[in-house]
Image (tube, rainbow, N blue to C red):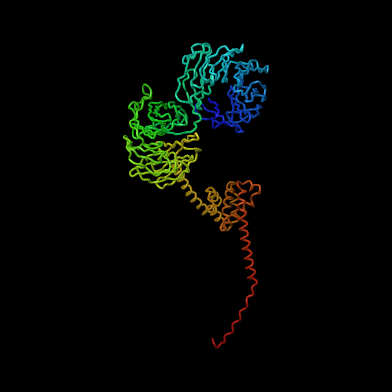
């Protein structure tokens, strides 16, 4: 089963196809004009999807393939605000901001009707469920419902009883009754035979959607008779079931705390037996229709992600705190989501206890909460506490045992909260609801907001970082001050203890990360590289490396031993507030203000293995190349050298061929038998060789072979040939000029040699015989 959902405030130009079973987005559909999509609808037979954009274009999609079948002008003079299919999936009605209603024949591709007379924006259109009656209903800014006859091409009736915008129209099974809901906090039952209102039901909330339920008993929803019952969704954030005849509410869904629970949409999938509701903070909630039991939750647009944590003993889940009072827990394998309600203001920070089942959250509502995940992956709140006078901005759990947690607040104080024994039991929720936490110690630690607290691995030390540019070390559980770390030029955003050494890491708004010795509070190292504030820091690789995130959207991996930044990861587009590493240090999780949560995998060992394999392969190939040259198997040697992608090695092979007594013929025969991609690589290598006067002869020899044996059309079809020719021409001209000058000098020297007149030497006098 799949469903279509319009993109959130960040992706208005897309319609997402969501797989209900897995929660994965199967496909995102975007019109060619890339304009915002103002309305869309899927036909009752699930075959045709139509979208309308601000460019006044309608697009018909084959949504399973993600392709546009047809694109046409809407003819409306303003954007389309709503649309609806008829029961036969052949007619489409569109209501525009220009006050017009148009009907289109989707099968034959033409407009059939144009109805005028509605003042302002037509925000609602609906066909009668009986296709034989050919009735269309619409509502505009005047809160009047108009009934149009497609057969007579006129308005049959104007139903006036609402005093505010009509938000939905739904029909009974027999088609004789219509139900309308509005923001005037009433639902009206209409008799379509007489076009009169037969019942007005006050629902005491602004209703955004109403759906009629199947006319059969549903005891779990309070439906005991077979009369007309309907369900409403509105600004109170609850689903409620009403009996139309008596006007009584027979079922009310339990209300969850916190803002953003207002319901903006509701739809019933009768065939699947499911009910879908949409909340104001863009979450999709899927219920079983007969009992309203929550089946699935899909988290929508997260806005600014403030913190993230791994959950579970094997890091199987992640919990995300975004710019919302709700927490979102995702299972990594299936992307299944749970939305946790409890806080009444934005959740600012998270932390997890050692075993991974318990985690804690703190929020702007000045409270903290502890949550437990059971083995089935279900999460519930097991404890809560309050006591700070301002928002609680940071929280840290004990490391050695699940015994306490520490919070830091904008009120400049730190509180130590011991965990009651009741929380350590195996029950998911203690009897009587969440346990009340009491602070054991309170200490004023800084002069400005406390941005970060960290508990040492032995649970005996506490570090605090503040906006006052200092970090401090405290002894637990009495919170006695041991020392102050001074050196940052701006406020501190994060403090972390090393898991292996007696070292503290601090991240600051001055763009640096510093390491401090716990014995004498001296600064050991400073890591500089971020161009903006460093928001989070974590020790990885057993304390030998640091991972930092900044407001520039970058993650940096540092090697502590030599202060070197070995990797910069650029995937976020805004401040990276959340950073957490898995237990095995093989994964990292980041969340940022760009509303993205990214899971990173440590591939250091994989890359090292690949590099080692490459080196071994290079050695084997080099040995094979030497053997081929020794055996004078030039074609195989040249192909192997080209596959190594090393111009100098290829040059060595060419030089070996040219040293052969039959060099010219063998070079031509070898180059001629190469594949086209090998010839393209050889041409690229020639460009490199041609820049050096010592190697230009080999380059010119290869070029000569290519020019003699390849047609100009084939050469021009080579990849990158134009750039290669542009690089070859100036150096070739320079070599030609140099050779021309050398030839002229040699010719002049030869001329001088042949024309020089050397004087004849005088003959030696004969030797007298007497001297012999």
Residue 247 rendering spot, x and y as whole percentages: 51, 13
Residue 754 rendering spot, x and y as whole percentages: 64, 71
- Judged left or right of residue 351, residue 63 is right
Picture layout, residue 561 above or below residue 771: above
Q: Residue at x 56, y 53 (%)?
A: 688
Residue 90 sits in which quadrant? top right
Closest to the observer, 712 or 312:
312
Residue 475 rendering spot, x and y as whole percentages: 32, 37
Residue 603 sits in which quadrant? top left
User: Can you name the residue that lies furthest to the front here?
Assistant: 447
Closest to the observer, 520 or 19:
520
Residue 309, visible in the rendered structure = yes
- Say how many tags the image has: 0
- Judged left or right of residue 705, residue 417 is left
User: Can you name the residue that lies furthest to the bottom here?
Assistant: 770
- Judged left or right of residue 208, residue 94 is right
Residue 276 rendering spot, x and y as whole percentages: 51, 22
Quarter in which the C terminus is drawn: bottom right
Residue 267, visible in the rendered structure = no
Closest to the observer, 412 or 131:
412
Picture layout, residue 223 above or below residue 607: above
């Amino acid at each position: 089963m799949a469903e279509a959902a319009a993109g959130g405030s960040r992706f208005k130009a897309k319609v997402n196809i969501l797989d209900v079973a897995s929660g994965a987005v199967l496909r995102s559909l975007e019109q060619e004009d890339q304009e915002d999509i103002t309305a869309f609808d899927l036909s009752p037979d699930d075959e045709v999807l139509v979208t309308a954009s601000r460019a006044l274009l309608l697009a018909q999609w084959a949504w399973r393939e993600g392709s546009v079948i047809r694109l046409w002008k809407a003819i409306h003079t303003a954007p389309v605000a709503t649309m609806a299919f008829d029961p036969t999936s052949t007619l489409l009605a569109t209501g525009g901001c220009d006050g017009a209603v148009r009907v289109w024949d989707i099968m034959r591709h033409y407009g059939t009707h144009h109805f005028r007379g509605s003042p302002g924006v037509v925000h609602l259109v609906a066909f009668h469920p009986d296709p034989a009656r050919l009735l269309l209903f619409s509502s505009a800014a005047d809160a009047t419902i108009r009934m149009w006859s497609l057969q007579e091409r006129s308005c049959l009736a104007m139903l006036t009883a609402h005093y505010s915008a009509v938000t939905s129209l739904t029909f009974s099974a027999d088609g004789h009754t219509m139900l309308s809901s509005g923001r005037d906090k009433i639902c009206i039952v209409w008799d379509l035979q007489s076009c009169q209102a037969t019942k007005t039901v006050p629902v005491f909330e602004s209703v955004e959607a109403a759906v009629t339920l199947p006319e059969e008993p549903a005891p779990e929803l309070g439906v005991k008779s077979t009369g007309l019952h309907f369900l409403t969704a509105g600004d109170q954030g609850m689903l409620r079931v009403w009996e139309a005849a008596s006007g009584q509410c027979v079922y009310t869904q339990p209300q969850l705390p916190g803002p953003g629970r207002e319901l903006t949409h509701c739809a019933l999938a009768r065939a699947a037996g499911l009910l879908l509701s949409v909340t104001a903070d863009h979450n999709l909630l899927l219920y079983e229709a007969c009992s309203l039991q929550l089946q699935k939750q899909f988290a929508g647009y997260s806005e600014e992600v403030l913190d993230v944590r791994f959950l579970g003993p094997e890091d199987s889940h992640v919990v995300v705190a975004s710019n919302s009072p709700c927490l979102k827990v995702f299972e990594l394998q299936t992307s299944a989501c749970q939305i946790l309600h409890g806080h009444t203001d934005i959740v600012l920070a998270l932390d997890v206890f050692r075993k991974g089942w318990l985690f804690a959250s703190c929020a702007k509502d000045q409270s903290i909460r502890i949550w437990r995940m059971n083995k089935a992956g279900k999460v519930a709140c097991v404890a809560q506490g309050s006591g700070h006078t301002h928002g609680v901005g940071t929280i840290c759990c004990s490391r050695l045992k699940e015994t306490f947690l520490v919070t830091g607040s904008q009120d400049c104080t730190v509180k130590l909260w011991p965990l009651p024994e009741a929380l350590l039991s195996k029950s998911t929720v203690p009897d009587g609801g969440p346990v009340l936490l009491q602070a054991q110690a309170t200490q004023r630690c800084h002069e400005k907001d406390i941005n970060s607290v960290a508990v040492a691995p032995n649970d005996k030390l506490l570090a605090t970082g503040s906006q006052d540019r200092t970090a401090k070390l405290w002894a637990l559980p009495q919170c006695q001050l041991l020392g102050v770390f001074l050196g940052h030029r701006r406020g501190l955003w994060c403090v972390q203890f090393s898991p292996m050494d007696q070292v503290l890491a601090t991240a600051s708004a001055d763009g640096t990360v510093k390491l401090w010795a716990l014995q004498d509070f001296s600064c050991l190292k400073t890591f500089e590289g971020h161009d903006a504030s460093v928001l989070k820091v974590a020790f990885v690789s057993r304390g030998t490396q640091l991972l930092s995130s900044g407001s520039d959207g970058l993650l940096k991996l540092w090697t502590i031993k030599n202060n070197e930044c070995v990797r910069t990861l650029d995937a976020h587009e805004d401040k990276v507030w959340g950073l957490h590493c898995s237990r095995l240090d093989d994964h990292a999780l980041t969340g940022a203000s760009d509303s993205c949560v990214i899971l990173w995998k440590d591939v250091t060992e994989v890359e090292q293995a690949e590099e080692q394999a490459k080196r071994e392969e290079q050695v084997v190939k080099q040995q094979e190349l030497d053997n081929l040259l020794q055996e004078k198997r030039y074609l195989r040697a040249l192909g192997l050298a080209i596959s190594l992608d090393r111009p100098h090695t290829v040059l060595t092979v060419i030089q070996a061929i040219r040293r052969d007594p039959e060099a010219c013929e063998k070079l031509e025969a070898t180059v001629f038998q190469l594949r086209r991609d090998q010839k393209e690589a050889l041409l690229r290598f020639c460009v490199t060789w041609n820049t050096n006067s010592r190697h230009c002869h080999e380059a010119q020899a290869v070029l000569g072979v290519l020019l003699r044996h390849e047609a100009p059309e084939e050469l021009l079809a080579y990849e990158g040939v134009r750039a290669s020719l542009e690089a070859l021409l100036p150096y070739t001209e320079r070599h030609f000029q140099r050779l021309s000058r050398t030839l002229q000098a040699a010719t002049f020297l030869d001329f001088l040699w042949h024309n020089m007149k050397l004087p004849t030497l005088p003959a030696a006098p004969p030797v007298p015989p007497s001297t012999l």
